[in-house]
Amino acid sequence: MPISHVIAQRDLRNQNAQILAAVEAGTSFVVTRNGTPVAELRPLAHGRRRLVSRSEIAAIAAAGPRIDAAAFRRDLIAAFDQDLLHA
């Protein structure tokens, strides 16, 4: 985990261009107000996708293990205390 530099809110205000340039270069900062940490500035993770297409999900599911639905149901029923189901 990268080390964060601690800066005061006043320094962020007065040196915002330099600090944002440092963040772009990979530096993280913890911003304090009256000595108390209140925020963190860190670089965004580039190249990380947030959405996966429907076709990709279907392909991943198709490549996964096959589940026998009837056997799965039997296993679930066997795992439950049958007295609770009929109470």
Image (tube, helix red, strand yellow):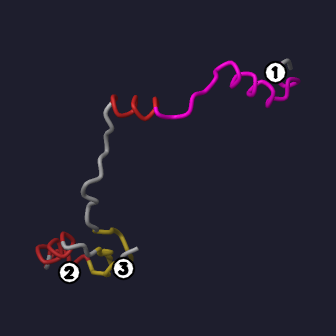
Find residue 47 and report its horizontal and vertical position in percent.
Answer: 25, 54
| Lateral position of residue 9 relative to residue 61, left or right | left
Counting from the top left corner in percent of width and height, residue 7 is at: 28, 81
**What label does residue 41 carry, if any?**
none
Disc 1 or disc 2, which is closer to the eye? Answer: 1
Residue with the most extreme right position = 83
- Considering only vertical position in the picture, is 42 above or below 71? below
Q: Which image quarter: residue 77?
A: top right
Magenta stretch in the rendered image: 63-85
Question: What amino acid does circle 3 point to?
Answer: Ile
- Per the image, the residue denoted by label 1 is 85
Tag 2, which secondary structure? helix
Seen from the viewer's position, the closer of residues 9 and 76 is: 76
- Against 34, is 44 above or below? above
Q: Could you say where residue 72 lies in the image, as x and y percent from the top left?
A: 69, 25
Labelled pair 1, 2 in contact (Cβ < 8 Å): no
Q: Which residue is mark 2?
A: 11
Q: Quarter holding the C terminus? A: top right
Mark 1 element type: helix
Please give the name of the residue rendered at 14% of the width and 79% of the height, measured from the top-left corner: 15
| In the rendered image, the vertical position of residue 65 relative to residue 25, given as above or below | above
Between residues 64 and 20, which one lies in front from this camera angle? Answer: 64
User: For the image shown, how many numbered marks are present on the structure?
Assistant: 3
The secondary structure type at the circle numbered 3 is loop
Label number found at residue 3: 3
Q: What amino acid is labelled 1 in the image?
A: Leu
Labels 3 and 1: the sequence-earlier one: 3
Q: How far apart are labels 3 and 1 at the CA level?
A: 54 Å
Q: Which label sits in the foreground, 3 or 2?
A: 3
